[in-house]
Image (spheres, rainbow, N blue to C red):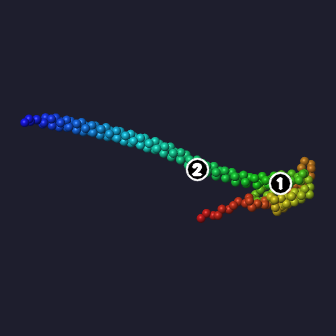
Amino acid sequence: MIKINLLPYRASKKKETLTQQLIILGLIFITSVIAAGVYYSITITKISTAKKEITRSEEELATLKKKIGEIDNLKKLQAEVQKKLDILSQLRKGKTGPAIRLARLSDIVPEKMWLIKYQESGQAVSISGLAYNEDLIAEFMRSIQSSQEYGNVDLQVSEQQEVNGVKLKKFDLTCIIKVDKKEEPKKEPPKK
């Protein structure tokens, strides 16, 4: 009988299998190391990108906070300007009242009569002037009394006066200003 020694074949087969297994194990290890490296690299890149994004967002937030501060300042300035405009509006309303009254008074003054003094003190008004005769003074008083702006006309003094050789009548009269309901200032309720 012939005996064949299969041991070296088995040993060589075992060696070959072991070599293949070591190569496969090495390839798996290298692949794992490469995969871990790639994953690590991707993670580091994501972290770096996130940090850059956070930095950019913080800078943008600081810029926006600065702009919000500027907007708040602009709102304060706008409120101040609005207050000033309201005050100007009130002043204009107060200004138009006397201006309108004086314009209408100049329309009422008859020819050959001159006003030399007009003074308002609250609602009281005193008017002084010169006229050629008493009839002009009386006509002027009736016109003032029938106007919408004045009431309670009262002649204080009427005397003769010579101006540049011409005899004129000097007069002083008083009246009150009629207050429209629209022009009356609104009283605010007292604060508690």
**Which residue appears at 10% of the width and 35% of the height?**
4
Q: Which residue is mark 2?
A: 76
**Residue 51's spot in the image, x, y percent?**
41, 42
Q: CA distance from mark 2 to mark 1?
A: 44 Å
Could you tell me which quadrant the C terminus lies in?
Answer: bottom right
Residue type, numbered disc 2 = Lys
**Residue 134's spot in the image, x, y percent?**
91, 57
**Residue 141's spot in the image, x, y percent?**
86, 59
Q: Is residue 168 visible?
A: no
The image quarter containing residue 153 is bottom right
**Which residue appears at 53% of the width and 47% of the height?**
68
Mark 2 or 1: in front is: 2
Foreground residue, 54 or 21?
21
Residue type, numbered disc 1 = Leu
**Which residue appears at 48% of the width and 45% of the height?**
61
Q: Which residue is mark 1?
A: 105
Image: 51 above or below 108 = above
**Relative horizontal placement of residue 20, taking residue 185 as reference (left or right):** left
Q: Tell me which numbered mark, 2 or 1, is placed earlier along the sequence.
A: 2
Q: Kindly indicate whether the residue at mark 1 contacts the one at mark 2 (C-beta within 8 angstroms).
A: no
**Residue 146's spot in the image, x, y percent?**
85, 60
Foreground residue, 7 or 43?
7
**Within-10-Å neighbours for mark 2: few <14, some 14–19, many 20+:** few
SS at mark 1? helix
**Within-10-Å neighbours for mark 1: few <14, some 14–19, many 20+:** some
SS at mark 2? helix
Q: Is residue 192 visible?
A: yes
Image: 153 above or below 61 = below
